[in-house]
Image (cartoon, rainbow, N blue to C red):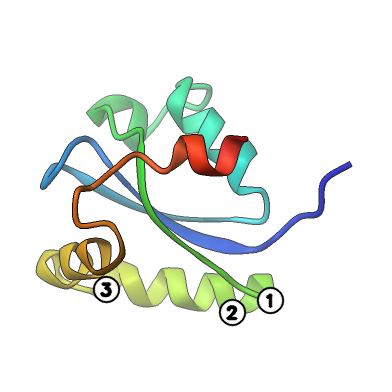
């Protein structure tokens, strides 16, 4: 059984595309759900499946606080955050799923 780790993540439809901010205690499971369109909603409607950034937290409370903060950010700040660690907007799915 794997350990759960609270985290905040950003998904994109493509480089400079539609963005989605989310929070989860199980990043692998949650990104799998987005990628396979298991839950109807924003990411399914707009094809937002590429994991481009994530940040681990020690508690769900801090992860949720950070998610709320990022949701208030303007688009340029989110893009800067992504490009600071992932300038090519690579899909990080393969890195976390293995």
The residue indicated by pointer 1 is: 58
Tag 2 and tag 1, C-beta contact below 8 Å? yes
Residue 54's place in the image compared with 56, above or below, is above
User: In what element is the residue under mark 3?
Assistant: helix
Residue 47 at what x, y percent from top left? 27, 27
Name which residue lies at 35% across and 26% down. 44
- Number of the front mark, 2 or 1: 1
The residue indicated by pointer 3 is: 72
Residue 64 at what x, y percent from top left? 54, 70
Residue 20 at what x, y percent from top left? 31, 49
Nearer to us in this view, 24 or 80: 80
The residue indicated by pointer 2 is: 62
Nearer to us in this view, 51 or 64: 51
For this orientation, the residue located farthest to the right is 1
Indicate the quadrant where residue 87 lies. Answer: bottom left
User: In what element is the residue under mark 1?
Assistant: loop
Q: What crowding class fits label 1: few (fewer than 14 Cα within 10 Å), some (14-19), or many (20 or more)?
A: few
Label whose residue precedes the other's in the sequence (3 or 2): 2
Q: What crowding class fits label 2: few (fewer than 14 Cα within 10 Å), some (14-19), or many (20 or more)?
A: some
Q: How many marks?
A: 3
Q: Is residue 90 left or right of residue 39?
A: left
Indicate the quadrant where residue 14 lies. Answer: top left
- Number of the front mark, 3 or 2: 2
Mark sitting on residue 14: none
């Amino acid at each position: 059984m794997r350990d759960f780790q609270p985290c905040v993540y950003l998904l994109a439809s493509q480089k400079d595309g539609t963005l989605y901010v989310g929070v989860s205690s199980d990043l692998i499971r949650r990104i799998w759900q987005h990628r396979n369109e298991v839950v109807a909603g924003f990411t399914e409607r707009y094809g937002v499946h590429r994991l481009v950034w994530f940040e681990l937290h020690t508690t769900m409370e801090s992860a949720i606080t950070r998610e709320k903060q990022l949701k208030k950010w303007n688009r340029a700040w989110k893009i800067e955050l992504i490009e600071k660690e992932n300038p090519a907007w690579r899909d990080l799915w393969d890195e976390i799923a293995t």
